[in-house]
Every structure is written in structure tokens, then in C-alpha cells.
Image (cartoon, rainbow, N blue to C red):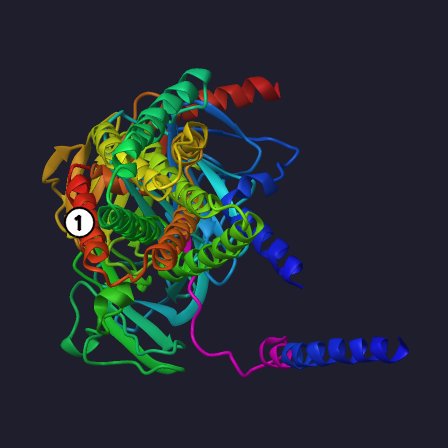
């Protein structure tokens, strides 16, 4: 008995002290690439959210150019009516970075919520249902009556309903988010989205996209562990955003990063015209660097002359190296067509 | 015969039955389908036990010290995410450990924080004050540590043994004083060894190991085991008048040897961790300190005739472990191993103290003698003063 106890305890202690002895290597070595381009081999698993192509539940590529114009109809007086349905939930566990699972609170099952898009002067109706276990609301930035503000009109959990109804305006890009206190918590878990109001006269034809700057404090220590453009850290590194040279690119940038007072945006290879909040048709700046405080947003317009890979990222390098960075891949559309022609014939 | 066998079986059954019942109860309470203990949230916990800096790479040894298995999913340096590899794999069962390799062009002498994130998004961090190239066990380094171990362990102890002729010429009460002085020295060493074990466990071991209780348990077990061995040793050599003092001196040497192993660990680890100034300080301090240990070995043998061979052998037993300690500390530092060795040393030293006290009582009379009490006090004070130098 005593001998058995001794052997077992020695074996256990031995395992604790010299675990390497007990480790048996896998057969097939895996390979990954470092920031400096070195190729490293391992017999174990690769932990690389940056360069290895990873698929997670949420698809930032789809979100990028996905605009919800609502169910459109015309009222008797000629006003366009746009109707949307938004359902809030707060029990979903989502893989927000490869291998990291986080309790996201969602509008229509996703973070960020759907991008609501209307034209200035349209009547917007949002049928909101709260299927969560907590109280939620939707608070739109922009013009609306006080009782449509989503502050005092708390929508109860387990199926509470409310219809937000207002005339879309002013033209620009706005956030919407839950405004139940503690707001930081409700936003931090993912209850936000983009609300675009197009000017009546329209904007110039362009390749349009949304970059929602967000962050996640996955261990609740008051500091964000991950930052991203469109939720998934480093996503546009391994899935570069494809754009055409000599074509106007319009990016709607909204900063919903909580906990950190500011965030910023930096573009490589060219400069952009910047329209703060998108409310004025005349750009305020021609720059490659814009600072955003919490919920600050704007519209960027630029184009690339040359093909290639151009980075965009937070110039707060901490944010960029924790996920908020990506790449535009500019390709020559005319050349591509020519190639296609030559190839086909 | 039959009767005896059946009674044996009965005894065995009566031993086993309570265990079986206990197993059934535990199975019922915790087993599948049980809803009795379903409350509360169990959080994952990992500990980064060691960080090494090699060519263009930082290597962290991580252990799952929580109550549930975890996946390690992300690595960072200074809170910046880096591509990394984990070997053998990212899934860690309870107590399992793995190596995380993070390619990184680190700068010598700068502080770094290594972070690992588990699947629920919790990040764990280990701070390293100074980045220094990890030392590989080359012949050069092995002999370097051996030389340092010799300077710290062997030479000072042997120098201390040179007090032998002085002690052997003392009067009875003065001799008693010096024996008691040895107790004081050892008492101090025992306390400082225990303190160091607790300190290392507090700084480097996860709470799951119950640092203080680990030290206490190992120390008590080593105390009891050495007590048993010492008793045997004395009985075997019982007839000889010399056996008593030699046995005691031998046990003192063994106890001090374990303590010096700890000192070697500290020096080796300090050099590896890049704390060169601390390493140099430790070497000088321990060398001064350890001459008193030679004295402690010499004292009980002073009443016997001079046995240079035995004395030198004991000096080696006490001193050589410092070399092994420096190797272990320098090449494969494991905080858990260090804590266990130091705790064994603590138990050994206290066992030696008890032996000497018993010996004084048997051979020289009462313990509450003024020269004994003064000796213990002076011993501790000497040790305290030399320890300040470290």
C-alpha cells in the first residue's frame, strides 16, 4: 500500500516537474509565417489569427457591402416608407476570433447589426422585438421625436415590442445602439449597427463599403482584448478587400469601440477626402489619418491608381496589432477584362 | 493456517469496504446525470511557469492549473498579438503543460510581458523583468557553474572545517556553547530555506499547488524520513563510541548539503534570469555565510580524535550539492522542483537541530543551560548579520 502510494505520488510529481518527458510529438509538422516573413515549423498546433486563413461564424466579407434598404412602399402623399424588422437577443456564444468564444448580444443575430439604409425624407419604421433575457432598446443617432429616442421607452425582455418611426435625416452616416444602462456593457457585447441616410440628390457612383470599428473586452478587465474592423480581428489581412483601380471607393467608417476614449483610421498608398458624419457634401479634409472618439463617424472617398496591396489600420498601433488592421487589394479592372478576353479567345 | 488466512481476508475486506462505499457516494454525487452540484461557474486557469529567450523566439511553458480543461488559442508579447505555435497541442487537460513558441525579435535587457488567451477570452500574463538569451548546457557553461558551485559550496565549508582544532581544545562549557551555536546557525538556515521555498511558490507557482502547505508537507515528510534513517544509522553503529558524533555530523552535512543545493539553485537561476548583479552578490554572500556551515559540521566531532578523511568527506557532502543546484537552476529551472528541494532541505535541517539537541541532552546534560541558550542566540545573530551581506 505504502509503496503504491509512493510510486503514484512520485509519478505525479515527476509529471508536474518534467512534463516534457510525457509529451509525444505529432507526426506531421505544421508551418506558419511570422510578421517578419520567417517561416516556422512546429510539431504542434499553430496559433495564428493574423495570416492563416480562418473561417468563423460571422462573415465580414458579406457584411462589408451589405445594405438593408428595408421593405419599400409609397404612401399616398408620395413619401417612401421603409420597414425593417430587428430582433435583439443576448444568449448567443459566437467565435469572434479563431478559437475565442464570447457571449455576443445581437441585433438580428449578428454583430454589428444590419446596416439600415434610407434616403433623407423617407419614413422609417423599425419593428423591434426583444427576445433577450435583459431589457434592450434601439437608440438611433439622427433626427427623430423624443419618444422615438430609445432611452425611456425600455423594451422588456422575452418578447417585448416597440416600433420606432421617424423621418430619416439628416443625410450622413450614423450609429444605432442599445441605450439601456449600463450602456457600456450593452454596446460592449455587440448591440450596435450602422444607419446610413443618403442625401436626396444622391452621391456619386462608387464602390461603397462599411467599416465598423469595434472591440471586445473578452475577460472583462476593463481593457479591450481584441479590436477589429467589422468584428473579426485581422480578417481583412487574410481576406483582403478587393477594389478596382481608378474607381471611386466610399467607406462609411463608424467607431463603436468602448472603453478606449479614441480610435483612429489610417490609409496607405493614397489620401482620402473626409466628410465628418457625412452631413456635408464638401469634404473637410484631404488626409490619410482621422481620429474618432466614441461613436464618432464619417465618410471617406478615395481611389487607387496603382494595383497592389494597401494596408489600412489604426495608427494606435496597439489596436492594429490586436486586430484592427486590414488590406485593400487593388486590381486593374481593365486589365482583368483584357486577360479574361485573351484567355477566352 | 486456514483460520489465519480467512482472518487476513476479513481484514482486507474490512479495509476495502469503506473505500468502496466512498467511491459509490462520490460517483453518485459527481457522476453523470447528477444535478446535486451544478451550481456556480468554473473558470479556466493557466499558469505561465517559465519564459525563455532563444534566437528570434520567445518560449513560454504553460500549465493548466484550473479545474477544467482549456484550449490555448492566442499568444501575445506586450499585449500585441503574434503568430505562434503550441506544442504538443493547444488542448490542455488539468495539470497538463505545453510549450508556446512565439517568433519574436526580442532585445537583450528589456522587460517583456508574455500573454496567452484561452478559449473563453481570458488572458493570462507573465512579466519578465530582463530578457536574456537562454543558457544552453554546453561544456563551457557546465564547468562555469561547477566552478561557481565550488566557490560557494565546497571551499567555504572546508575553510569552516579548519575551526576543528580550535573547537577541540575548548573547555566543556565553552564546547557546549559552540555546539549550541551550531543549533542557532541551523535554526536560521532552516527558517531561511523555508522562507525561500514559500517565496518561490508565491511568485512562480499557481495557487492550485497550495504553496505554503506544499512546503509544510514536504518538510514534515522529509523530517520524519531523515529521523527514521538517522535513528537506524545510530543503532547500527551503536557499539562504537564514535558513532554518535560522526552520525550527527553526517546528518548535519546532509542537511546543509540540501540547503546548499537551494543556494546553488538561486545562483544558477539568477544568472540565467540575467540578474548578473544579484548573481554576484549571491556568490559573495553565500560564500561568507557558508564558512559557518563548516563550523557546524566540525563542532559535534570536536570531542573525537581528528579524522581528516571523514571531515573532508562531510565537507564535500555539504558543499557539492551547490554545484548540482547551480546546474539545475541554470539549465532546467522548474519552480516546482525548486520548492520541493528547498522544502526537503527545511525538513532535513530541522531534523538535524533535533538530533543535536538530543545529543547535547544525552552527553552534556541539560538544554536550559546558560551557555546553550547563549550559543543558540549568538548563532542566529551571526547568521543574520552575514545574511545581510547577500
In-image side of A220 versus B384 (left or right): right
Where is residue B89 shown, x and y percent of the image? Answer: 55, 43
Quadrant of the image for the C terminus of chain B?
Answer: top left
* Residue at the (23%, 81%) spot, across then down: A153
Magenta-drawn segment: B25-47
Answer with the quarter of the image where residue B303 lies: top left
Where is residue B384 shown, x and y percent of the image? Answer: 18, 46
* Residue at the (17%, 49%) spot, across then down: B378
In-image side of B4 versus A45 (left or right): right
Given residues B16 and A218, the one toward you in this image is: B16
Quadrant of the image for the N terminus of chain B?
Answer: bottom right
Tell me the residue that label 1 is attached to.
Answer: B378
State the SS at label 1.
helix
Q: Is residue B7 magenta?
A: no
In-image side of A171 versus B187 (left or right): left
Given residues B135 and B101, the one toward you in this image is: B135
| B73 shown above or below A71 | above
Q: Residue furthest right?
A: B2
Mark 1 surroundings within 10 Å by alpha-carbon count, few (fewer than 14), some (14 through 19), many (20 or more)? many
| A44 shown above or below A255 | above
Is residue B254 in sight in this rendering?
yes
Where is residue B197 shown, x and y percent of the image? Answer: 34, 50
Where is residue A62 shown, x and y percent of the image? Answer: 44, 48
Given residues A221 and B176, the one toward you in this image is: B176
Q: Is residue B30 magenta?
A: yes
Name the magenta segment's main secondary structure.
loop
* Residue at the (30%, 81%) spot, across then down: A155
Answer with the quarter of the image where residue A183 lies: bottom left
Which of the chains bears the disc numbered 1?
A: B
Answer with the quarter of the image where residue A148 lies: bottom left
Is residue A274 in sight in this rendering?
no
Given residues B201 and B364, the one toward you in this image is: B364
Amino acid at each position: 500500500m505504502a509503496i503504491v502510494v509512493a510510486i503514484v505520488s512520485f509519478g505525479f510529481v515527476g509529471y508536474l516537474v518534467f512534463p516534457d518527458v510525457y509529451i509525444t510529438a505529432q507526426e506531421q509538422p505544421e508551418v506558419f509565417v511570422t510578421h517578419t516573413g520567417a517561416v516556422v515549423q512546429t510539431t504542434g498546433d499553430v496559433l495564428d489569427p493574423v495570416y492563416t486563413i480562418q473561417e468563423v461564424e460571422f462573415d465580414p466579407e458579406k457584411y462589408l457591402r451589405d445594405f438593408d434598404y428595408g421593405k419599400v412602399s409609397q404612401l399616398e402623399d408620395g413619401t417612401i416608407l421603409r420597414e425593417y424588422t430587428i430582433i435583439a437577443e443576448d444568449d448567443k456564444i459566437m467565435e469572434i476570433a479563431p478559437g475565442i468564444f464570447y457571449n455576443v448580444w445581437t441585433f438580428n443575430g449578428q454583430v454589428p447589426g444590419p446596416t439600415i439604409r434610407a434616403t433623407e425624407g423617407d419614413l422609417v419604421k423599425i419593428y423591434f422585438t426583444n427576445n433577450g433575457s435583459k431589457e434592450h432598446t434601439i437608440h438611433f443617432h439622427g433626427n427623430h421625436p423624443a419618444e422615438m429616442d430609445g432611452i425611456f421607452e425600455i423594451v422588456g425582455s422575452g418578447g417585448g415590442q416597440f416600433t420606432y418611426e421617424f423621418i430619416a435625416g439628416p443625410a450622413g452616416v450614423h450609429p444605432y445602439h442599445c441605450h439601456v444602462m449600463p450602456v457600456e456593457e450593452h454596446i460592449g457585447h455587440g448591440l450596435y449597427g450602422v444607419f446610413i441616410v443618403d442625401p436626396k440628390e444622391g452621391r456619386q457612383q462608387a464602390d461603397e463599403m462599411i467599416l465598423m470599428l469595434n472591440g471586445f473586452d473578452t475577460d472583462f478587465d476593463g481593457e479591450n482584448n481584441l479590436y477589429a474592423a467589422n468584428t473579426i480581428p485581422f480578417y481583412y489581412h487574410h481576406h483582403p478587400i478587393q477594389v478596382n483601380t481608378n474607381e471611386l471607393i466610399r467607406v462609411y467608417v463608424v467607431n463603436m469601440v468602448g472603453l478606449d476614449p479614441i480610435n483612429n483610421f489610417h490609409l496607405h498608398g493614397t489620401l482620402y477626402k473626409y466628410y465628418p458624419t457625412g452631413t456635408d457634401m464638401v469634404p473637410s479634409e484631404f488626409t490619410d489619418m482621422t481620429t474618432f472618439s466614441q461613436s464618432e463617424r464619417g465618410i471617406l472617398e478615395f481611389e487607387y491608381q496603382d494595383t497592389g496591396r494597401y494596408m489600412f489600420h489604426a495608427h494606435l498601433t496597439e489596436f492594429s496589432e490586436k486586430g484592427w488592421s486590414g488590406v485593400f487589394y487593388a486590381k486593374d479592372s481593365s486589365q482583368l477584362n483584357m486577360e479574361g478576353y485573351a484567355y477566352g479567345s | 493456517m486456514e483460520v489465519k488466512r480467512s482472518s487476513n481476508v476479513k481484514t482486507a475486506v474490512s479495509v476495502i469496504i469503506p473505500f468502496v462505499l466512498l467511491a459509490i457516494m462520490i460517483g453518485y454525487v459527481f457522476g453523470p446525470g447528477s444535478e446535486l452540484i451544478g451550481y456556480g461557474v468554473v473558470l479556466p486557469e493557466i499558469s505561465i511557469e517559465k519564459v525563455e529567450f532563444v534566437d528570434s523566439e520567445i518560449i513560454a511553458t504553460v500549465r493548466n492549473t484550473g479545474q477544467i480543461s482549456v484550449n490555448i488559442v492566442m499568444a501575445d508579447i506586450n499585449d500585441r498579438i503574434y503568430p505562434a505555435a503550441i506544442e504538443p497541442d493547444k488542448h490542455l487537460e488539468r495539470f497538463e503543460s505545453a510549450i508556446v513558441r512565439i517568433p519574436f525579435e526580442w532585445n537583450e535587457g528589456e522587460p517583456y510581458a508574455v500573454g496567452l488567451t484561452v478559449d473563453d477570452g481570458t488572458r493570462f500574463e507573465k512579466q519578465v523583468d530582463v530578457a536574456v538569451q537562454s543558457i544552453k548546457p554546453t561544456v563551457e557553461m557546465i564547468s562555469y557553474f561547477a566552478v561557481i558551485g565550488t566557490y560557494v559550496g565546497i571551499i567555504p565549508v572546508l575553510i569552516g572545517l579548519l575551526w576543528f582544532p580550535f573547537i577541540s581544545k575548548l573547555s566543556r562549557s565553552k564546547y557546549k556553547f559552540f555546539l549550541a551555536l551550531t543549533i542557532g546557525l541551523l535554526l536560521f538556515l532552516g527558517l531561511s530555506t523555508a522562507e525561500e521555498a514559500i517565496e518561490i511558490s508565491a511568485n512562480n507557482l499557481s495557487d492550485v499547488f497550495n504553496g505554503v502547505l506544499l512546503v509544510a508537507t514536504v518538510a514534515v515528510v522529509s523530517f520524519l524520513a531523515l529521523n527514521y534513517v538517522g535513528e537506524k544509522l545510530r543503532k547500527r553503529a551503536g557499539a562504537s563510541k564514535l558513532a554518535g558524533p560522526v552520525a550527527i555530523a553526517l546528518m548535519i552535512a546532509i542537511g546543509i548539503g540540501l540547503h546548499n543545493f537551494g543556494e546553488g539553485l538561486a545562483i544558477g537561476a539568477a544568472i540565467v534570469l540575467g540578474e548578473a548583479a544579484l548573481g554576484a552578490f549571491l556568490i559573495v554572500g553565500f560564500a561568507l555565510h557558508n564558512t559557518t556551515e563548516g563550523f557546524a559540521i566540525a563542532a559535534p566531532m570536536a570531542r573525537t580524535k581528528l579524522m581528516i578523511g571523514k571531515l573532508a568527506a562531510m565537507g564535500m557532502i555539504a558543499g557539492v550539492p551547490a554545484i548540482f543546484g547551480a546546474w539545475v537552476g541554470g539549465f532546467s529551472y522548474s519552480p516546482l522542483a525548486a520548492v520541493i528541494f528547498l522544502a526537503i532541505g527545511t525538513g532535513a535541517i530541522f531534523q538535524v537541530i533535533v538530533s543535536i539537541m538530543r545529543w547535547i541532552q544525552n552527553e552534556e546534560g541539560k538544554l536550559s543551560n546558560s551557555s546553550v541558550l547563549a550559543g543558540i542566540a549568538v548563532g542566529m545573530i551571526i547568521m543574520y548579520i552575514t545574511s545581510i551581506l547577500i
